Image (tube, coloured by chain):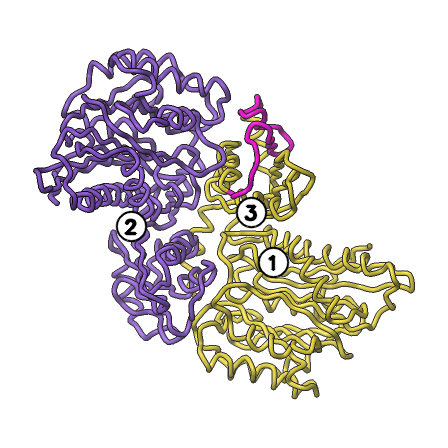
Chain colours: A purple, B yellow
Amino acid sequence: MRIIEGGGVTAPSGYRAAGIQTGVKESGAKDLALVYSTRPANAAAVYTTNKVQGAPIAIDREHLADGKARAVILNSGNANVCNGDAGLDHARRMCALTASELGLQTEEVLVCSTGLIGVPLPIAKIEAGIPQIVAALSEEGGATAAEAIMTTDTVPKSCAVEIELEAGRVVVGAMAKGAAMIAPNMATMLAVVTTDAAVPSGPLQELLSQAIQRTFNCITVDGDMSTSDTVILMANGDGAELGERDCARLYEGIEYACRQMAQAIARDAEGSSKLITIAVRGAATEVEARQVGIAVANSSLVKTAAFGNDPNWGRILCAMGYAGVEFNPETARVSLCGTGIYGNGAGLDFDENKLSAAMQAEEMAIDIDLAMGAATAEIFTCDLTYEYVRLNAEYTT
Amino acid sequence: MRIIEGGGVTAPSGYRAAGIQTGVKESGAKDLALVYSTRPANAAAVYTTNKVQGAPIAIDREHLADGKARAVILNSGNANVCNGDAGLDHARRMCALTASELGLQTEEVLVCSTGLIGVPLPIAKIEAGIPQIVAALSEEGGATAAEAIMTTDTVPKSCAVEIELEAGRVVVGAMAKGAAMIAPNMATMLAVVTTDAAVPSGPLQELLSQAIQRTFNCITVDGDMSTSDTVILMANGDGAELGERDCARLYEGIEYACRQMAQAIARDAEGSSKLITIAVRGAATEVEARQVGIAVANSSLVKTAAFGNDPNWGRILCAMGYAGVEFNPETARVSLCGTGIYGNGAGLDFDENKLSAAMQAEEMAIDIDLAMGAATAEIFTCDLTYEYVRLNAEYTT
């Protein structure tokens, strides 16, 4: 597996992308993105499990019923959620116009929207932009597409990786946007993963679902699960054929790309000052390992202590205790930045000033050993800061 | 039911209390409280469901096995959690010395501790204080006892209510402390409820458990469930006898006292600027009503919007959507400060500036109609502010 520096959704063979500005965002920033496969592609998707879902998700479920898609049109600045029948109509029109400009069937186009909830989509602006964005499609367009899906993200998020197979090479590319309203059970707001491997749509869905469990569902910013979260995976078969043992290698590439995107989202979380990685081991099952890690990751008290560089193991232990997972506090162990802070049912001796200084780095590791089994999980989150409160108390555009 | 202004745990007949300073808190504030019944009393308790529990809870379970207790000794400034065998020994010694000074059996005394986790309890200071606090017991001591259990609370929390029964009157009194690390499934950190009604310990436990479901388990500050949360109810039979139909009236009094304490905790939550009351109706069951209310109450995005006086119904709807409860977003309705903001699957027309101005009051109401049934619940929480982050990033003593 080789990382392609600066790569994104157009790194695999046979993909074009673009990102342009249509005026949906009043700031004048880019707000419309398109990812296009030059040949027929199989596709899979995973959506938010929120009962309230954006109109685009309803349309994507329809269009993906056959497991095929050739383009994804995405806008930022407006999530097209809670807009009733008009919302559904707008999402359909985005697909229809994109299809017509590309010479495709409407059902071959998927749609994603992210931004404000409950504000009617300025469909005229988007419709005016679609012919322009189709004209702007290019093999180098992955980077601008990643820019155009940002909302409160401070950096665009892309990656690509090359995988050697028996019969040659394939590439996996990805782009994502995150920031806030991110929680397990569909973490990121939006991500598109592309590959030039040839994979039937059934196995493609399995690959994606498994990778998401271990990546996007392992990040949490504020415990809030969005109404729009969607991850789409396209496979157009423009690269090498998959041999018998290649499926596992391809999975590794997809999981890697998804993990890169998930970490980038946690690192760029709204108002965060540091990335927190919570590694849980010794769990009875992988599900329980995740459950404990997520309880710790969602604890406002752990997150504020991280912000304050306070090596407060009591709060970590407290969150482990209400995760709903069986363990023995007498045998569990906790380390912070590599230093043991809790074991044998009590706090361990450590240099508080030295550890507090270590916590000031941009990345902070919490290691938990439940001493119940052999399963592990890794969860990514961020601290809770003044800036998070400021951004979310003031965010209206 | 008549409210006794300024009343607390010593308002019912046959109770004495006191609160003193022993030096557990370095600030010099009061840190030891005692509640004592002059005659034998039945007692019931509900504890945190956190897997990590303070030593006092283990001791209280032993001492309450017979359903009887005559005194509760409580300290603040140190939670006596994760202190191993020494913690258990210290909790036992607090009960033993209190019992010996009061001429009781050790098993007749319960113990509660609240404050820092994982710091050895300064037992010598507490033991030096116990003879003093026994000497200080008085019928007017409820107020100082309520003061002595405060940690980051800004005001002491007490109440009392008189209930007319067929054969005369009984009184219910209560004190509580809260602030942070408060979540459903044992909300407050500590509360003691006293009554001079005569109730066997079995029914007493039922009354308490039901009242807690509707009161302390309906408040949430930050979603973090403490390792120490305990509510104790004592009934000493020093008041009027209960007639056949009096049990329901007594229950009302207990629920009222518990609700007063729960609301006071939410109102005084760490760093909060307003009390948020979330009334859910139209739910299929009371459990589901609570579940939806609590999801909304725990949403950092709803809480920061409340702080910013932003009538953001999208965030409320989003939190309702991930509560894990079945409902139809097309028929559900949401009001904020009495103004309809969401209905018929979309945002309603309202004057945003006027509503934002209304949100600036000290109390804010969110009303949710799930349109699924007839069950209701009322949840109390607070906003998420800069001050919450400051307090919890800096709290170490």
Determine which residue is flagged by label 3: B294
Mark 3, secondary structure of its residue: helix
Q: Is residue B105 above or below residue A188?
A: below
Give percent across and percent down for residue A323: 45, 58
Give percent across and percent down for residue A204: 27, 37
Q: Earlier in the sequence, mark 1 or mark 3?
A: 1
| Figure quadrant of the N terminus of chain A | top left
Picture quarter containing residue B59? bottom right
Asked if marks 1 and 2 touch (Cβ < 8 Å), the reply is no
Amino acid at pointer 2:
Leu
Chain on which label 3 sits: B
Nearest to viewer (mark 1 / mark 3) = 3
Determine which residue is flagged by label 2: A275
Q: CA distance from mark 1 to mark 3?
A: 25 Å
Specify the segment rendered in magenta: B323-350
Determine whether, in the image, residue B315 is placed left or right of residue B259.
Answer: left
Q: Judge the density around disc 3: few (<14), some (14-19), many (≥20) Cα neighbours within 10 Å.
A: many
Q: Are marks 1 and 3 on the same chain?
A: yes
Q: CA distance from mark 3 to mark 2?
A: 28 Å
Chain on which label 1 sits: B
Seen from the viewer's position, the closer of residues A273 and B251 is B251
Mark 1, secondary structure of its residue: loop
Determine which residue is flagged by label 1: B155
Picture quarter containing residue B232? bottom right
The residue depicted at 55 percent of the width and 31 percent of the height is B329
Amino acid at pointer 1:
Val
Give percent across and percent down for residue B330: 56, 27
In this orientation, does residue A29 appear? no
Is A90 magenta? The answer is: no
The residue depicted at 65 percent of the width and 68 percent of the height is B45
The residue depicted at 56 percent of the width and 72 percent of the height is B57
